[in-house]
Image (tube, rainbow, N blue to C red):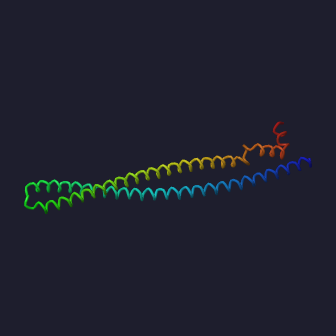
Amino acid sequence: MLEQLQRLQAHIGVLKTRLHHFERENTSLTEAKQLAETDHHAQVVQKNSIITQKQEEVDNLTEQLTQLQDQFKQLNQDATTLAERYSRLEKSTTDLKNRFQEILAERNDLRINKEKLQVQQRHSQQEIQDLQQDRDRLLQKNELAKSKVEAIIQRLSILGTAQDQHAQEIQQLAHPNAETHEET
């Protein structure tokens, strides 16, 4: 009987040590999960901020491009008008020729600016796509980490419940008479 009691006490000591170890591990995993969620949230907020900023830049560039295209169309119309006048007004050839050259230069400048803006717009759109892919990858990674942590917490929560085989063995060793009473 004393030997059985000592074995039970030793077994209880081992179980208490294991329980304490699992509680520490559970606490550590919970803290790690919270830290990972906080880090992930900060990254998502940062990426969203960058995406918003880039989207605003794209919107501004698109607006500028539209304005420049309107100006470009207007300058093309002006150039056409001046070309028609040039043929009719040979007396003011020099003045009209100079104005025509200025408009062509402006049109070329606008064309160059338009091409630059289009390149910038494509680059910004690519950056937005890259950032969105990064965000999606981070969200998937976070979900995977959550599921792993929840699985570990689930396993740890089983300890000390009726599902725990060691708890049942301790119960049987602690109350061996209860079994014989139930059988009779």
> Would you identify the image quadrant in which residue 175 lies?
top right
Q: Which of 183 and 75 is in front in this view?
A: 75
> Would you identify the image quadrant in which residue 111 lies?
bottom left
Q: Is residue 177 above or below residue 110?
A: above
The residue at the point 16 percent across, 53 percent down is 80
> Would you identify the image quadrant in which residue 40 lies?
bottom right
Q: Which of 29 and 61 is in front in this view?
A: 61
Provide residue 68's location: percent of width, then percent of height: 27, 57
Identity of the residue furthest to the bottom in this view:
95
Provide residue 62's location: percent of width, then percent of height: 33, 55
180 with respect to 155 (left or right): right
The residue at the point 81 percent across, 39 percent down is 182
Count of number-bearing discs = 0
30 with respect to 117 (left or right): right
Identity of the residue furthest to the right in this view:
2
Q: Which of 87 and 135 is in front in this view?
A: 87
Q: Is residue 143 above or below residue 67?
A: above
